[in-house]
């Protein structure tokens, strides 16, 4: 654990009404950077806690460094506590269906009328427009936004192997919040920030849209694409492993040919320019494949690293727990998750002055901080007991 006092967002209060991934990802980024984030959960806890299979890692990943209070927002008392929390907040984050928070009296219009400095971030499926009332998920956005088409082979659209749109959409939410905070320094007033899944996906595939504009030809799915470089592929090794290697500049091509004794290719004037090599892939790739197939994975990785070219072994997520770089650089955060299991998960992928951002609070238990927070709101013991007994707070 580390002290949060010296972190860049220390002193900022965030109230989070979120579930699943996109909304919580906004909160965990702000929390890791030092903001005091309170997660408002329904009685019994966020249903995300109980997901199975691919969803079982959502809650532990995106809810560290937060406090938890459980409220019945359908009750007058529970809603009253929520409004008190928001009245003292710098930032509110929510990712419920359009109109849900407004109906509760917890929308931006209602809360900002009482707290004009409030920055309110809504994480939605779509920004305002014809689709804004549709229900969306990460996979929905990947399918309709072109990412699944680009990821899978022709005729077989495939979602990316992570909740990449939820997480990236959340990152854009944080960017919007930080921009609003900066503007608030001058105006004294907050802003309403909206981030979305669909528009995030469109932004991510914009390079492929631009390809059509630049070439007159639509982008092909990544497995079928014409590479921008002659060597930018997975290669098999003698021990039946696979290694990605890229040669992405003319100078790297010279280095590569010298290191692997490909003098006849390196000296060939027809191959000195990248685009010419791309057109000659049918000549170059079989030669490279044969050389790499005669080497073990360890031999190939060592050789490529020694000459400074881009490379990567094909790694499974579970292998990252023992990754030398992540462990020695502070890239993994030690956590105890609900249920008592101890683990380590990736830290924010940024550093400041060489320091990484870690853990100040473990992933909270359901309503772990409810009583503590009622005390901070100034409620006396009798009122706290009444709220708990009435089931407005859990």
Image (cartoon, rainbow, N blue to C red):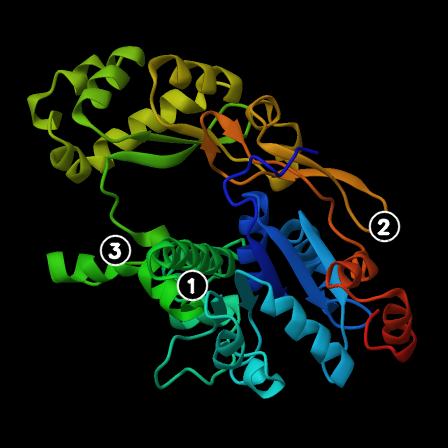
Q: Quadrant of the C terminus?
A: bottom right
> What's the distance in space between the residues labelled 3 and 2, CA to CA?
43 Å
Judging depth in this view, the residue of 113 and 107 nearest the camera is 113
Q: Quadrant of the N terminus?
A: top right
Residue beneath label 1, please? 148
Badge nearest the viewer, 3 or 2 = 2
With respect to residue 178, does 329 lie above or below?
above
Residue 207, labelled with which disc? Answer: 3
Query: Mark 2 or 1 closer to N-term?
Result: 1
Label 1 CA crowd tier, 10 Å (few <14, some 14–19, many 20+) = many
* Identity of the residue furthest to the left in this view: 269
- How many marks can you see? 3
Residue 146 visible somewhere in the drawing: no
Q: Position of residue 213 (x, y in %)?
A: 13, 62
Badge nearest the viewer, 2 or 1 = 2
Q: Look at the numbered disc 3 and give the secondary structure of its residue.
A: helix
> What's the distance in space between the residues labelled 3 and 1, CA to CA?
15 Å
Q: Position of residue 109 (x, y in %)?
A: 48, 80
> What's the distance in space between the residues labelled 2 and 1, CA to CA?
35 Å
Query: Mark 3 or 1 closer to N-term?
Result: 1
**Picture residue at 58% right of the left edge, 76% below the top:** 96
**Picture residue at 42% right of the left edge, 75% below the top:** 126
116 with respect to 73 (left or right): left
In the rendered structure, are the residues bearing label 2 and label 1 in contact, judged by CB atoms less than 8 Å apart? no
Query: Mark 3 or 2 closer to N-term?
Result: 3
Q: Position of residue 390 (x, y in %)?
A: 89, 79
Residue 211 visible somewhere in the drawing: yes
With respect to residue 250, does 167 lie above or below?
below
Q: Position of residue 336 (x, y in %)?
A: 78, 42
Residue beneath label 2, please? 339
């Amino acid at each position: 654990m580390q002290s949060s006092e010296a972190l860049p967002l220390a002193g900022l209060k965030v109230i989070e009404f979120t579930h699943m991934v996109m909304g919580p990802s906004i909160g965990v980024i702000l929390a890791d950077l030092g903001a005091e984030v309170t997660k408002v959960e329904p009685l019994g806890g966020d249903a995300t806690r109980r997901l199975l299979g691919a969803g079982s890692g959502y809650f532990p990943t995106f809810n560290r460094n937060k406090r938890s209070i459980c409220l019945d927002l359908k009750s007058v008392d529970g809603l009253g506590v929520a409004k008190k929390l928001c009245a003292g907040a710098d930032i509110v984050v929510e990712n419920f269906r359009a109109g849900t928070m407004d109906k509760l009296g917890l929308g931006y219009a209602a809360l900002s009328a009482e707290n004009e400095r409030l920055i309110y971030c809504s994480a939605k499926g779509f920004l305002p427009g014809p689709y804004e009332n549709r229900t969306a998920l990460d996979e929905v956005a990947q399918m309709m936004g072109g990412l699944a088409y680009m990821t899978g082979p022709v005729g077989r659209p495939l979602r990316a192997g992570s909740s990449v749109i939820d997480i990236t959409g959340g990152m854009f939410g944080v960017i919007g919040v930080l921009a609003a905070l900066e503007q608030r320094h001058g105006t004294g007033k907050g802003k309403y920030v909206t981030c979305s899944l669909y528009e995030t996906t469109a932004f991510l595939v914009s390079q492929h849209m631009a390809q059509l504009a630049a070439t007159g030809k639509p982008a092909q799915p990544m497995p079928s694409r014409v590479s921008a470089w002659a060597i930018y592929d997975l290669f098999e090794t003698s021990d039946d492993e696979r290694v990605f290697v890229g040669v992405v500049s003319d100078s790297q091509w010279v280095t590569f040919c010298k290191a692997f004794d490909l003098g006849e290719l390196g000296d060939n004037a027809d191959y000195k320019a990248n685009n010419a090599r791309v057109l000659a892939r049918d000549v170059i790739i079989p030669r490279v494949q044969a050389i790499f197939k005669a080497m073990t994975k360890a031999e190939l990785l060592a050789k490529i690293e020694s000459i400074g070219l881009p490379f990567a072994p094909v790694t499974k997520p579970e292998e990252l727990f023992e990754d030398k770089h992540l462990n020695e650089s502070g890239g993994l955060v030690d956590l105890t998750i609900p249920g008592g299991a101890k683990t380590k998960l990736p830290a924010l992928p940024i550093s400041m002055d060489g320091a990484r951002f870690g853990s100040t609070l473990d992933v909270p238990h359901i309503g772990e901080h409810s009583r503590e927070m009622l005390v901070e709101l100034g409620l006396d013991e009798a009122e706290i007991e009444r709220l708990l007994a009435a089931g407005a707070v859990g």
